[in-house]
Amino acid sequence: EAQVTQNPRYLITVTGKKLTVTCSQNMNHEYMSWYRQDPGLGLRQIYYSMNVEVTDKGDVPEGYKVSRKEKRNFPLILESPSPNQTSLYFCASSLFFSHGGSTDTQYFGPGTRLTVL
Amino acid sequence: GENVEQHPSTLSVQEGDSAVIKCTYSDSASNYFPWYKQELGKRPQLIIDIRSNVGEKKDQRIAVTLNKTAKHFSLHITETQPEDSAVYFCAAGITGGGNKLTFGTGTQLKVEL
């Protein structure tokens, strides 16, 4: 089954304790992205990646790191989490290029609800 | 960068009525406009999208219209049903341009019986 997976789904942690949220897709998509969703603010992009070893900042990158060592994985790293990073996080992927077909649909993972105390 | 504004933030309609959600965007280079539906506790899912070479697109009870000159696009849902109750997000981006999407802030649609 084609899908985007994230782990963990729920996480409660404390300020300053490094954490990683994993994201994996099995659709051979080039493009992957991380969003955070907060009430009244919609989905805001944190980082994105157009292919292996190519990453770029989105609209709210402060306090986050990412890496793209393999095509299927795009982990989100919080080196020193703070309470303002409490949010719902979504990973998404899409096919960046194809020969004439629709390539822009972003498929979202199930979400990770993070609470930083 | 791109800025997308979405209105209204909440919308309540009676079952069977129509619902309209409107979005405006700022970057004239944007040419791809998807709409996502997010049910409570679930992930956003694409319901319809439109590219700037067309002005309207329909899929059963859902339609999207685009006015590139005015930089606005709208989602129309006809004959609303309780299962249409969800949060709807519009987005704007450049097709093939790294697929970077900028999302609106969402509309909570409630369809009342």
Image (cartoon, coloured by chain):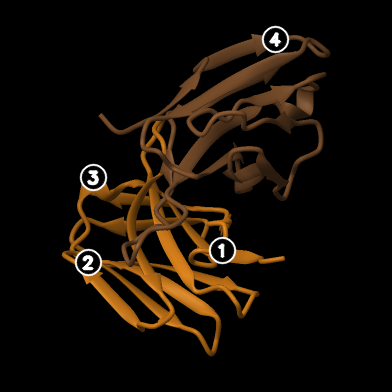
Chain colours: A brown, B orange
| Disc 2 element | loop
- Mark 3 highlights which residue? B83
Could you tell me which secondary element the residue under label 3 belongs to?
Answer: helix
Q: Residue B18, percent across and down?
A: 27, 67
Residue A13 numbered tag: 4
Percent x, y of residue A56:
71, 46
Question: What residue is at 58 percent from the left and 56 percent from the top?
Answer: B100
Kindly indicate the quadrant of the structure image that contains residue A39: top right
The circle drawn on residue B78 is 2
Query: Numbered disc 2: what chain?
Result: B
- The residue labelled by disc 1 is B97
The reply to whether dot 1 and dot 3 touch (C-beta < 8 Å) is no
What is the crowding at mark 1: few (fewer than 14 residues within 10 Å), some, or many (at least 20)? Answer: some
Q: Residue furthest bottom?
A: B69
Q: Residues within 10 Å of mark 2 (few under 14, many from 20)?
A: some
Q: Which chain does the residue under circle 4 lie in?
A: A
The total of numbered circles placed on residues is: 4
Residue A17 location, x and y as percent?
78, 10
> Earlier along the polypeptide chain: callout 3 or callout 2?
2
Say what secondary structure mark 4 lies in.
strand
